[in-house]
Image (cartoon, helix red, strand yellow):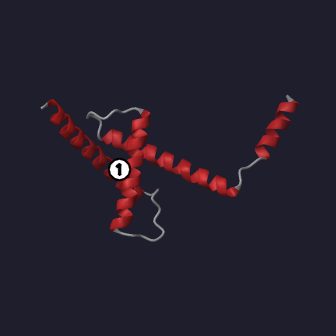
Amino acid sequence: MEAFLSKLDTLLQLNFPPRVQAVANVILIWVGFAYIVGLITRLIIWGGQWRRGPYTVFLVGLTGSSVGFLALMTWRPLENFNPFSPAGLAVSVVAAILSLLVYQLTSFIFFKKREG
């Protein structure tokens, strides 16, 4: 048991380089934020034909986060804006809902043409 604890202490003292740790933190924050946006979008648009698996929820949230952030920065460039704020969350959810509506509209148009 002592050998295991000493090896565990050695492992706990190892760290990534600061640059790698900063990149990993940003990626994990975006993944978490995108999943939260996807879950909120799923709660708002419960019905519909979009699949509600964990990957789809993440992809919808990631799309909403990216499009919402880019639209907000294009519409009104703000200095020191934090996208992980209540305003960023609201814009991301609205963008995710709009992207789902565009997806459903285009899939309806293309599937309607195939049937006819």
Q: Residue 115: give x, y in percent of width and height.
A: 15, 30
Q: Residue 35: give x, y in percent of width and height.
A: 45, 43
Element at badge 1?
helix
Q: Residue 11: give x, y in percent of width and height.
A: 78, 41
Going 30% across and 48% down the picture, which residue do you hit?
99
- Looking at the rendered structure, the kind of residue marked 1 is Val
In the rendered image of this protein, does residue 68 appear above or below residue 49?
A: below
Q: Which residue position holds label 1?
A: 93
Looking at this view, is 62 or 87 the one in front?
A: 62
In the rendered image of this protein, does residue 50 appear above or below residue 77?
A: above
Give the image quarter of residue 2: top right
Going 83% across and 31% down the picture, which residue do you hit?
4
Binning the other alpha carbons within 10 Å of mark 1 as few (below 14), some (14 to 19) or many (20 upward) gives many
Going 34% across and 48% down the picture, which residue do you hit?
96
In the rendered image of this protein, does residue 68 appear above or below residue 76?
A: above
Going 29% across and 40% down the picture, which residue do you hit?
45
